[in-house]
């Protein structure tokens, strides 16, 4: 059971790293960051079809990450995490 938790932690960490690295590049290049645009939020949830990232940093730097619910992969990732958490809690 411990190995499963470590594997899941590694997968989530890698996903966060690779999908949020685009933000650093866009900020370094001086590009507009769609995270700060109010039009990309629906009912307080980040929803931007033009953003290719699944996991995106929150508006306030250093406050964590959120999912881009315009992409089906983010919903699948959320279901996967909830399912694994439910199964490991038994």
Image: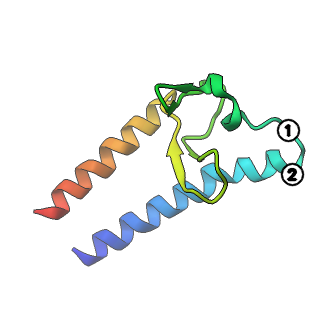
Give the class, few, some or many, for how many residues have Cα within 10 Å of label 1's Cα (few <14, many ≥20): few
- The part of the image, by quadrant, that contains residue 41 is top right
Residue 46's spot in the image, x, y percent? Answer: 54, 33
Secondary structure state at the residue bearing disc 1: loop
Residue at position x 18%, y 54% in the image:
86
Looking at the picture, the colour scheme in use is: rainbow
Report whether 80 appears left or right of 38: left
Residue at position x 45%, y 30% in the image:
72
Secondary structure state at the residue bearing disc 2: helix
Q: CA distance from mark 2 to mark 1?
A: 8 Å
Q: Which residue is mark 1?
A: 31
Residue 36 lies, with reference to residue 90, above or below; the image says above
Residue at position x 46%, y 25% in the image:
43
Residue 42's spot in the image, x, y percent? Answer: 51, 24
Residue at position x 10%, y 62% in the image:
90
Report whether 37 appears left or right of 65: right
Query: Furthest-right residue in view?
Result: 29
Of residues 40 and 77, the one drawn nearer to the viewer in this rendering: 40
Q: Which residue is mark 2?
A: 28
């Amino acid at each position: 059971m411990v190995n499963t938790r470590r594997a899941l932690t590694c997968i989530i960490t890698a996903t966060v790293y690779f999908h949020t690295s685009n933000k650093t590049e866009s900020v370094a290049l001086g590009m507009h960051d769609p995270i700060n645009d109010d039009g990309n939020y629906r009912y307080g949830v980040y929803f931007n079809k033009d953003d290719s990232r699944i996991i995106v940093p929150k508006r306030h730097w250093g406050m964590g990450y959120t999912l881009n619910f315009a992409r089906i992969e983010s919903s699948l990732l959320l279901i996967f995490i909830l399912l694994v958490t439910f199964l490991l809690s038994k």
